[in-house]
Amino acid sequence: MKKKSIQPDRKEQTKQKLIKAVGQVLGKEGFKGLGVNKVAKAAGVDKVLVYRYFGGLPQLIGEYSRTMDFWPTVNEIIGPDPDGLLKMSPDKQIAHFFKAFLSALRKRPVTQDILAWELLERNELTKQLEDIRIKTILQYFDFLDGIPDDDNLSAIIVLMGGAVNQLIVKSRINRSLGGIDLESEKGWDQINKAIDLLLTGIFNR
C-alpha cells in the first residue's frame, strides 16, 4: 500500500504555522526556553514535522529570520520613493534609515521581545537572527550614493543603532523615558526630530 503524500498546500500551511510558532515561543520565553517540543505544541503539529520540513530548530529559526513578521526588508526601510531618497543629502539619508527602522520595529512587538531576550542570551541561534539584520543594513547602505567612507561615521552609525535597539526594547516596558511619551505619536516625533538634529550636527561639524 502506497503511503499517502501530504498535499502541497497543506504542507505549506503547516510550515507557516511552525515558522509563526517559533517566533511566538521566542518572544515569550527567550532562547533558553526554546525547544522543538514547545514550538510544535504552539503550532499544534507533531514535532517530527520540524525535522521533516526544516531539518531542525536552527533551520526553522533561519526561515523565521527571513520573514517580514520578524524583520523589515530593505525595500520597507527605503520606502515608497527610492529616487527621492537618492536625491537627499547623506545626513538625511542616514536619518531616514534610523527613523524608518524605528517605525518598522514599532510595528513588530514580537521582534521587540526577541531583541530584549538577546540582551541576556547570546548563542548560535541569536547569531542567525543578527545576521539577517546586518544583511538588511548593508543592503540599505549599498543602495545609497555618496555616503562618505569614514571610520568615525561608521562608529557613529553603530552607536546610534545600539541606541535605537535599546530605545525600542525599553518602549516595550516603559510608557515614557526622560519625559518623552513612548505611547504617543508626539513622543516618537520628538525622537525623529532628535535623529535629524544629531545627523545634521555630525555632518556639519
Image (cartoon, grey):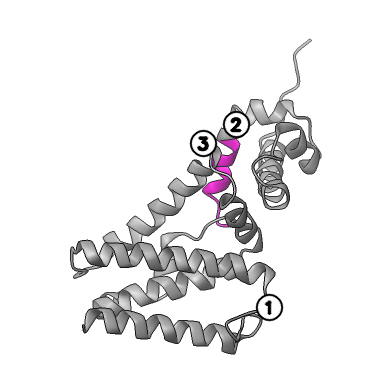
Tell me which segment is drawn in magenta.
Answer: 59-68
Residue in view at x 72 percent, y 47 percent: 29
Residue 116 vertical placement versus 183 (above, below)? above
Considering only order in the chain, which callout, 3 or 2, is on the residue closer to the N terminus?
2
Residue 159 vertical placement versus 135 (above, below)? below
What element does badge 3 sit on?
helix
Q: Residues within 10 Å of mark 3 (few under 14, many from 20)?
A: few
Residue in view at x 39 percent, y 51 percent: 135
Residue located beneath label 1 in the image = 175
Mark whose residue sits in front, 1 or 2 = 1
Mark 1 residue type: Arg
Is residue 107 among the parts visible in the rendering? no
* Residue 3 screen position, x and y as percent: 75, 16
Residue located beneath label 2 in the image = 54
Alpha carbons under labels 1 and 2: distance apart: 39 Å
Residue located beneath label 3 in the image = 124
Quarter where residue 57 is shown: top right
Alpha carbons under labels 2 and 3: distance apart: 17 Å
**Count of numbered circles in the view:** 3
**Is residue 49 toward the left or the right of residue 111 in the image?**
right
